[in-house]
């Protein structure tokens, strides 16, 4: 199972379970849909993709989220791994992402962590939006901090 973007797909249990053949073998269409990362690389090349990621990282860091350290790298992530349920004011919980889509994302620890409290920020983005959430250990009690259209 090879990737176009360099992601390590071979150990992905979700991909194995869902018979993913990887993007290299499917021309950027794992799970029978076009991956925006693979499409970006196939049409513009790795250099343009790296420029896009650098611009996206700059946008994320310019959000000024309190307690969030600077993001230095984004990784290709399947939605199933980052699609958290966020509590809404109505009391219901809502997933905002698509389990079958690919995103660019990262997890960084809050600069305010101490020995007892451990919080992380989850960053997820694609061509259309940036999402930043904060949560506890094992993604417990997620809170949506930023959802911004690009």
Image (cartoon, rainbow, N blue to C red):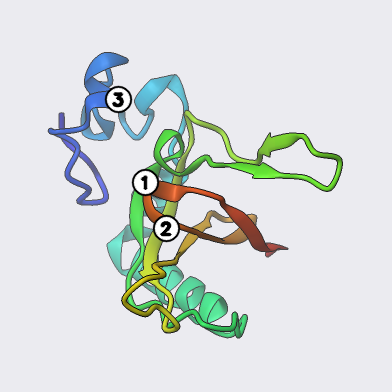
Front-lying residue, 50 or 72: 72
Q: Please, is residue 58 above or below residue 35 in the view? A: below
Q: Residue furthest front?
A: 116
Q: Please, is residue 143 above or below residue 4 in the view? A: below
Q: Please, is residue 55 above or below residue 88 in the view? A: below
In screen coordinates, is 16 left or right of 92?
A: left
Specify whether residue 38 is in view: no
Residue beneath label 1, please? 77
> Percent from the top left, x then y, of residue 121?
47, 66
Task: Tell me the SS state at disc 2.
Answer: strand
Q: Please, is residue 48 above or below residue 96 in the view? A: below
In screen coordinates, is 80 left or right of 30?
A: right
Residue beneath label 2, please? 105
Task: Tell me the SS state at disc 1.
Answer: strand
Sequence-first disc among 2 and 1: 1
Split into 4 quadrants, where in the image is the C terminus?
A: bottom right
Q: Residues within 10 Å of mark 1 (few under 14, many from 20)?
A: some
| Residues tagged 3 and 2 counted as in contact (Cβ below 8 A) | no
Residue beneath label 3, please? 14
| Residues tagged 2 and 1 counted as in contact (Cβ below 8 A) | yes
């Amino acid at each position: 199972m090879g990737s176009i973007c360099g992601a390590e797909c071979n150990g992905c249990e979700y991909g194995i379970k869902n018979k993913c053949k990887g993007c290299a073998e499917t021309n950027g269409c794992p799970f029978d849909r076009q991956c925006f990362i693979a499409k970006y690389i196939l049409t513009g090349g790795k250099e343009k993709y790296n420029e896009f990621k650098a611009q996206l990282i700059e946008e994320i860091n310019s959000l000024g989220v309190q307690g969030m350290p600077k993001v230095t790298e984004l990784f290709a992530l399947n939605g199933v791994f980052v699609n958290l349920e966020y509590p809404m004011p109505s009391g219901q919980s809502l997933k905002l992402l698509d389990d079958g889509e690919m995103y660019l994302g990262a997890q960084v620890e809050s600069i305010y962590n101490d020995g007892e409290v451990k919080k992380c920020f989850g960053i997820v983005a694609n061509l259309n939006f940036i999402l930043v959430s904060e949560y506890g250990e094992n993604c417990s009690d997620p809170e949506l901090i930023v959802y911004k259209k690009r």
